[in-house]
Amino acid sequence: MLFIIFTAEGLTQAQEQVLNNKAELWLNPSLKKQSDLSVFEQLGITLHTLPEEIDASNEKAVMTALSHVEAQSHDKDILVEYL
């Protein structure tokens, strides 16, 4: 299982589920830079950065991010933050 998260609010909402499932995280570059991710790192959660900043309200951009993650991961159980 993995999560694609674009916003700090989305990360907060998904945190419990990510930690319970030890799911991988794919994050917007700015979110990865601005967030305290130590709780995830301490539990061995794999963190990835999306190749570019994604506007979560832009469906086409979200689909582009999903396509990128699908191409990079063998895990097809993907949860995506939608606004």
Image (cartoon, rainbow, N blue to C red):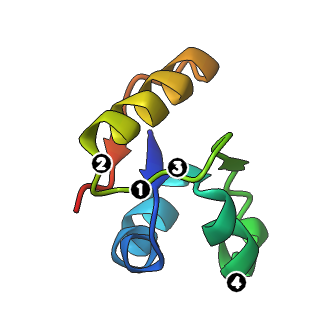
Q: CA distance from mark 3 to mark 4?
A: 17 Å
Against 69, residue 21 (above or below) is: below
Q: Report the quarter where the C terminus lies.
A: bottom left
Please tell me which residue lies in front, 39 or 10: 10
Please tell me which residue lies in front, 9 or 40: 9
Against 74, residue 66 (above or below) is: below
> Does label 1 or label 4 sit earlier along the sequence?
4
Residue 53 x/y as whole percent: 58, 53
Mark 1: which amino acid? Asp
Which residue has dot 4 on it? 36
Q: Nearer the viewer, mark 1 or mark 3?
A: 1
Which residue has dot 2 on it? 58
Q: CA distance from mark 2 to mark 3?
A: 24 Å
Q: Secondary structure at mark 1?
A: loop
> Does label 1 or label 3 sit earlier along the sequence?
3
Q: Residue at x 39, y 39 (%)?
A: 61
Mark 1 vs 2: CB contact within 8 A: yes
> Does label 3 or label 4 sit earlier along the sequence?
3
Mark 4: which amino acid? Asp
> Does label 2 or label 4 sit earlier along the sequence?
4
The crowding category of the residue bearing disc 4, from other C-alpha atoms within 10 Å (few below 14, some 14 to 19, many at least 20), is: few
Which residue has dot 3 on it? 23
Mark 3 vs 4: CB contact within 8 A: no
Please tell me which residue lies in front, 79 or 55: 55
Q: Report the quarter where the N terminus lies.
A: top left
Mark 2 vs 4: CB contact within 8 A: no
Q: Nearer the viewer, mark 3 or mark 4?
A: 4
Q: Which mark is residue 55?
A: 1
Q: Quadrant of residue 55?
A: bottom left
